[in-house]
Structure formats: structure tokens, C-alpha cells
């Protein structure tokens, strides 16, 4: 079995290390045959965008090593699907100068830091072509222009005569860098240049959340115009990102742009694993019996009309279930959810209106919603309402284009497109559930004065506890109704800050583990126990209370408390049903 190399995003490295590779090389053929001058591929994160661009780079580039010698990459494509393409395509192997940059690292707290991260990335690509300094095809003036980019000071600030800190004024130089470098490369190689820009919108997303979006838009717009619009030495370009940032903000006047989004049929099979590719991978690693589990957790995406699995999660799953590793009993995990902060989902859930909460309920419970969808959006569109609240329409757009929702069907009214959408799979459902749970706990802990609850507990006032908790439950969404674990965690979060008590969950006591025990800091006070139950129907709540009492008695929780040296315990049974709770005191 070939090694599964987690985290590798570069085609040549994958091939040179003889790692398992799902063959997507016919992307090369299709971009020649079907592609446009500038191709923008928008896909969710971790769906193979960087791998796609580095595949193009390895195939087309007339690569020169650091010693100035040509590099032959033909061996990287031996036995791959692309070798069955026509001569028109194969004759392009290793023939073009290529500029490649990934903007993923440009995530800093301020514009200055992010710009100089971008500058460093661009300079690294300039340095890769330093052989131009010894080119007989370039004049001394042209070499001097190259040197200006190549040797520009990488420190973002300088100290002026008065000791002040000043930002270096080279934004203009580096916004024009790829356009300028393209002309020099064309003169040296005698061929137009291929430009590959990966994850172009990462700096924009970060800038939006950090508060300097407009400044970053200005730089990225200028960089794109010089690289992709006015560049007379451009053969073609491929750009990737999660979202299509609207023409008005980034792609101003770029009539040579062809957008391939998750709704587009062309190129659909090159980002993510098709069912056939997924089943072959499972077969290659003797995991075919787990096909249904993999489908439930990681399938469900629809790009154009093509069914697609999450490639990152499938690869991680297979890696952790390889029989040779003796880890065949590892449960499926939400691998994709751990690859970023899921800021967009957090933004939606934390700012949710009652309408959004109702729709989230419907989604998490397996239902669908219908929303108008449009591709021309910006991060700033999230807050485009005059009252300053989040634009819910645009947030649903974000969730769809970034992989948190999938298309079920679509319809058109005039020039408006409406999609019926659902949650793709169990992995994404997990993200919603955890974010909703976190939101609710944070809302409860940060915005609720719990002194009335604490007083009711100390007074053994069951009605007071019920009233306080029921008011909070009515603010919640219904996603977790009848799930005992949710109610346990929710109620536990209310108790952690109760004065003069240490609150613990599921700790050994007697011959079992009470759901919640609260140990007094004073030897004169009794401990407090809560046993939590949940029921689906209101008439069953009394039965839940009785079950809680029976568990407290038979597992000797109170006796255990006394054995630990406390004077005794006050024990409550609490049963939840939907947005209500019932509390009873165990009479001793």
C-alpha cells in the first residue's frame, strides 16, 4: 500500500514521495480545451485547490533550478491520465514560464503586517526566477527593474530622522510585480506566462474580521489588474478561492474572467473525490465494508451535477483506519471542522435572529431551506443593513459557497435564482451542532444574572429553579430537544460560578457517578446533587423525576457524600422536555 501523505498540497512532492494520489491530471487537458484567459475556481477549503494549481505548475512550467539548469518534470506524469491526451496538450509540457503564489499565509492582525506577508510571498516567487539576472535577453535596465523587486527590504518599517516608525512605501511596486515580471520572463523564454494564484480571498476574509477590509481590497484589486487584466504577456491564469468576491470590488472591468463555482458543471470532478474515486481508495486500503459510514459522514456535496466527497476528510479517515496500523475500530470524526475557525458559521449563529434559529432547527433536524443565491458578494456584504445587524441573506450565500450547505434543487424567477439547500452530511451537521451549543452556552454565561437561580437552589425552591431555567430554554433553538447530554451541559454551565461551591460533573460518588455534584467550601454546608433526565413527552416528565430519584438512592450518592466527610447532601431530580423543565427535591 502506498503511503497516505496527510497535508501535502504540492503535486510534485506527492509524486516524488510515491504517495497515494487520486489522479486529477486531466484538469490540464480541460483547462487547455475548455478554459478561458483567466479562470477563477471557487471551492470550499480543503477541496484540492492548491493541489490543482501545483499540478498545472508541474506540467506547464519550463522550470529552472537554483543553479540555472532546466528541470524535466515529465517523470511526474508517467502513467497518469493526462498522458492519454492529444498531442496539442502534451506538446505544452514544460514549455512555459510560470508564476505561482499562494496567499494563504497572509493573515495578520493589521494591514501593514498582512501586506508585508504578501510582499514576502511575492518576493519568494521573484527570487525563484533570479536566473533572469544572468539572461542575455534582458537589458541592464530590465535587470535593474528585476533587482528592485528582488532586493527590496523585507522589513515593513523604517525609522525616520526623528526616530518615528514609518511604513515602507512599496505597495505600488508589489502590486505591479507579477505584471512586470511577466514581461521579463516572456522576453527570456520567448513564451507568454502562466499565472497561478492560490486562495486569493484568504487575506480578504482575514481583513474583514480584523477590521481593515477596504485597504486590503485596494491592494488585491491593483495586484489583480496588473497581473491578469493589463498583462500583455499572459498565456492564461488560474485563480482559486472559497468565494467569488464581486467584480465591483476585486475584478473591476475584467471581462476575461471565467468563474467556475460550485454551481458550474465544467471542472466539477477536479475538486473533491467522486464516488468512484472514493470507492477505489477504500478498496485499495481494504476498507470497502466502511463505504456506508464514509458516505454518511463525508459525501453529499454537489458541484454542478457531480456528486463529490470531502477529499480531506476521506483521506484522513482512510489514514486512521488502515488495517496495517491496527486502528480499524477508530470512529469517524469531523476532520474538516478542525481545519479552520469556522468563523462564518460562528458569525451566523452568534448573530442569529429568531427566524435564523428556526431555519437552523429545520436544517439540523434534516430539513431544507430555500434561499435566493447570487455569486457577486463581498465580505463587507455581511453587514450591509442600515441597522448594523447581519445580513441573513448574504450569510446563507456564504454558507452555500463555502461548503456548509448543499444544493438539493434550484428554480429561477426572472433573473433571480433560488436554491433549496440542506446540510451535506454528518460531519457538517456536527459543526452546526457544536457551534449552536457553544453559542447557547456563551449567551447564557455572559448575559444572564444567575443570582436568582443560586438563591432558589440554596432555598430548595423547586418552583424558582423551574422558572429561571424555563425562561432561558425559551430563548434556545429546538435542535437538541430531548437530548439528555445537551440539557446536562446546559444546566451545568449555569452552576459553575455559584458562590461557595465547587461544581463537578460525572465524578465518582457512592457506587456510581451523579450527573452534577456541588461540593461546599464550608464544612457547615451540605453538598448539592442534581440528577438530569430528559423525556420526549410532557406526561413522561414525572417518570423522569422518579428515575432520577431511584438512581440517587440505588447508587448511594448521598451515602458517598457523607463518606467523603461532608455533613450530607441536598438532592434534586430535574427532567427536561423540549423547552420546559421539572424540578423536584428528594425527600430524605
Image (cartoon, grey):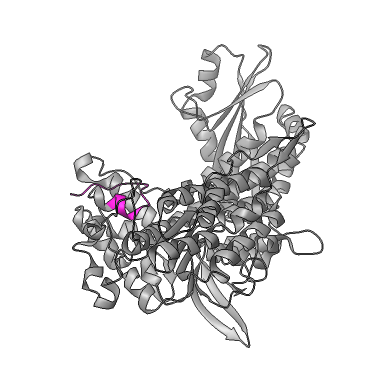
Query: What secondary structure characterizes most of the magenta part?
Result: loop
Relative vertical location of residue 555 with respect to residue 56 in this rendering, above or below: above
Looking at the image, residue 179 sits to the left or right of residue 474; the answer is left
Viewer-nearest residue: 456 or 27: 27
Q: x, y (%) of residue 264? A: 46, 76
Of the 4 image quadrants, the one containing the C terminus is top right
Q: Residue 376, located in which quarter of the rendered image? A: bottom right
Toward the viewer: 540 or 473?
Answer: 473
133 in magenta: no
Q: Residue at x 45, y 57 (%)?
A: 100
Left or right of 31? Residue 407 is right
Residue 97 seen in the figure: yes
- Residue drawn where x is 68% and y is 12% of the image: 524
Q: Please report the bounds of the magenta region as a residue range.
A: 1-14
Q: Nearer the viewer, residue 4 or 16?
A: 16
Counting from the top left corner in percent of width and height, residue 360 is at 59, 61
Question: Residue 205, located in which quarter of the rendered image?
Answer: bottom right
| Tally of numbered tags | 0
Q: Is residue 578 visible?
A: no
Relative placement, left or right, of 231 versus 221 is left
Q: Position of residue 464 (x, y in %)?
A: 75, 38
**x, y percentage for residue 373?**
60, 74
* 4 is within the stretch colored magenta: yes
Amino acid at each position: 500500500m502506498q503511503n497516505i501523505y496527510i497535508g501535502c498540497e504540492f503535486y510534485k512532492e506527492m509524486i516524488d514521495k510515491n504517495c497515494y494520489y487520486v489522479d486529477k491530471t486531466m484538469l490540464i487537458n480541460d483547462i487547455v480545451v475548455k478554459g478561458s484567459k483567466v479562470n477563477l475556481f471557487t471551492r470550499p477549503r480543503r477541496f484540492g485547490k492548491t493541489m490543482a494549481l501545483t499540478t498545472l505548475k508541474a506540467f506547464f512550467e519550463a522550470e529552472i533550478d537554483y543553479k540555472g539548469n532546466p528541470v524535466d518534470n515529465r517523470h511526474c506524469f508517467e502513467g497518469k491520465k493526462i498522458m492519454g491526451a492529444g498531442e496539442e496538450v502534451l506538446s505544452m509540457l514544460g514549455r512555459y514560464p510560470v508564476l505561482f503564489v499562494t496567499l494563504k499565509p497572509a493573515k495578520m492582525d493589521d494591514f501593514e503586517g498582512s501586506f508585508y506577508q504578501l510582499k514576502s510571498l511575492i518576493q519568494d516567487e521573484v527570487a525563484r526566477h533570479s536566473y533572469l539576472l544572468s539572461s542575455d535577453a534582458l537589458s541592464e535596465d530590465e535587470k535593474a527593474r528585476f533587482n528592485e523587486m528582488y532586493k527590496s527590504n523585507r522589513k515593513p518599517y523604517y525609522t525616520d530622522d526623528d526616530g518615528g516608525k514609518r511604513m515602507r512605501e512599496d505597495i505600488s511596486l508589489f502590486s505591479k510585480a507579477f505584471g512586470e515580471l511577466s514581461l521579463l520572463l516572456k522576453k527570456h523564454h520567448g513564451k507568454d506566462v502562466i499565472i497561478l494564484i492560490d486562495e486569493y480571498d484568504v487575506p480578504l476574509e482575514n481583513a474583514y474580521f480584523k477590521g481593515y477590509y477596504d485597504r486590503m481590497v485596494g491592494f488585491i484589486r491593483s495586484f489583480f489588474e496588473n497581473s491578469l487584466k493589463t498583462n500583455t504577456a499572459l498565456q492564461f491564469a488560474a485563480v482559486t478561492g472559497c468565494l467569488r468576491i464581486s467584480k465591483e470590488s476585486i475584478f473591476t472591468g475584467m471581462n476575461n474572467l471565467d468563474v467556475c463555482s460550485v454551481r458550474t458543471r465544467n471542472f466539477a470532478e477536479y475538486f473533491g473525490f467522486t464516488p468512484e474515486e472514493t470507492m477505489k481508495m477504500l478498496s485499495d486500503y481494504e476498507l470497502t465494508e466502511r463505504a456506508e459510514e464514509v458516505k454518511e459522514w463525508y459525501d453529499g456535496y454537489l458541484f454542478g451535477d457531480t456528486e463529490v466527497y470531502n477529499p480531506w476528510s476521506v483521506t484522513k479517515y482512510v489514514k486512521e483506519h488502515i488495517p496495517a496500523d491496527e486502528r480499524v475500530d477508530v470512529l469517524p470524526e469531523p476532520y474538516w471542522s478542525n481545519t479552520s475557525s469556522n468563523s462564518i458559521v460562528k458569525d451566523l449563529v452568534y448573530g442569529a435572529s429568531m427566524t435564523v434559529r428556526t431555519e437552523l432547527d429545520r436544517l439540523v433536524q434534516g430539513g431544507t431551506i430555500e434561499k435566493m443565491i447570487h455569486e457577486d458578494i463581498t465580505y463587507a456584504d455581511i453587514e450591509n443593513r442600515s441597522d448594523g445587524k447581519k445580513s441573513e441573506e448574504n450569510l446563507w450565500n456564504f454558507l452555500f459557497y463555502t461548503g456548509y450547505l448543499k444544493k438539493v434543487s434550484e428554480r429561477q424567477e426572472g433573473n433571480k435564482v433560488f436554491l433549496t439547500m440542506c446540510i451535506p452530511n454528518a460531519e457538517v451537521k456536527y459543526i452546526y451542532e457544536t457551534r449552536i451549543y457553544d453559542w447557547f452556552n456563551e449567551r447564557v454565561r455572559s448575559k444572564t444574572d444567575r443570582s436568582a437561580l443560586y438563591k432558589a437552589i440554596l432555598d430548595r425552591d423547586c418552583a424558582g429553579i423551574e422558572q429561571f431555567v424555563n425562561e432561558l430554554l425559551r430563548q434556545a433553538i429546538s435542535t437538541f430537544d430531548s437530548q439528555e447530554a445537551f440539557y446536562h451541559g446546559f444546566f451545568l454551565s449555569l452552576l459553575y460560578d455559584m458562590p461557595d461551591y465547587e461544581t463537578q460533573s460525572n465524578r465518582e460518588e457512592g457506587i456510581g457517578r451523579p450527573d452534577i455534584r456541588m461540593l461546599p467550601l464550608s464544612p457547615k454546608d451540605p453538598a448539592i446533587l442534581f440528577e438530569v433526565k430528559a423525556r420526549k413527552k410532557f406526561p413522561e416528565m414525572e417518570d423522569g423525576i422518579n428515575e432520577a430519584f431511584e438512581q440517587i438512592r440505588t447508587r448511594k450518592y448521598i451515602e458517598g457524600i457523607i463518606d467523603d466527610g461532608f455533613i450530607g447532601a441536598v438532592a434534586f431530580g430535574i427532567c427536561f422536555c423540549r423547552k420546559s423543565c421539572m424540578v423536584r427535591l428528594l425527600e430524605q
